[in-house]
Amino acid sequence: MPMNAIKASIGKMSANYGGRLFKMFAVNAPSTIYFTWKIVSGFCDPVTVEKIKIFKKNTDKVMFDNIDPSQIEEKYGGIQPNRK
């Protein structure tokens, strides 16, 4: 995704939906996204950092503290059958 589109999306989401995110999980994120978040998260509010979790693999079980495994497809580490 182009960086300009990402910035525009984040700006619109912040302006219209600020404070509404409960948790966000990004699984199988590319290394560039993962390491970029590690750097950017140092400048973000700790509450925001706690809400956003980015994983390089889908095997991290932190997701299951908030999401029932029956709601996550097998390819992401849950027990729900994969959809096509």
Image (cartoon, rainbow, N blue to C red):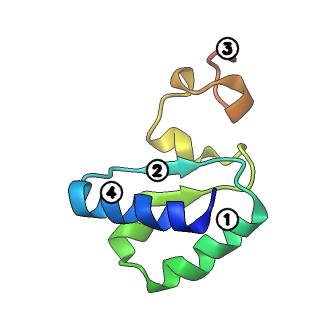
For label 4, the crowd category at 10 Å Cα-Cα, with few meaning under 14, some 14 to 19 and many 20 or more, is few
Q: Which of marks 2 and 1 is nearer the N terminus?
A: 2
Q: Where is residue 22 in the image (x, y as percent from the top left)?
A: 33, 50
Which element type, helix, strand or loop, lies under badge 2? strand
Residue in front for this viewpoint, 24 or 62: 24
- For badge 1, the amino acid type reads Ile
User: CA–CA distance between discs 3 and 4?
Assistant: 31 Å
Q: Earlier in the sequence, mark 1 or mark 4?
A: 4
Give the labeled residue for mark 2: 24
Q: Is residue 13 left or right of residue 75?
A: left
Give the labeled residue for mark 1: 33
User: CA–CA distance between discs 2 and 4?
Assistant: 14 Å
- Residue 19 visible somewhere in the drawing: no
Which element type, helix, strand or loop, lies under badge 3? loop
Residue in front for this viewpoint, 31 or 70: 31
Callout in the foreground (3, 4) = 4
> Badges 3 and 4: C-beta atoms under 8 Å apart?
no
- For badge 2, the amino acid type reads Met
Give the labeled residue for mark 4: 13
Q: In this view, does 49 lie to the left or right of 40?
A: left
Residue shown at 53%/67% (left/top)?
A: 4
- Residue 35 visible somewhere in the drawing: yes
> Badges 1 and 3: C-beta atoms under 8 Å apart?
no
Give the quadrant of residue 63: top right
- For badge 4, the amino acid type reads Met
Give the labeled residue for mark 3: 81
Q: Position of residue 58 (x, y in %)?
A: 71, 43
Which element type, helix, strand or loop, lies under badge 4? helix
User: Quick one: quadrant of the C terminus?
Assistant: top right
User: CA–CA distance between discs 3 and 2?
Assistant: 22 Å
User: CA–CA distance between discs 2 and 1?
Assistant: 14 Å
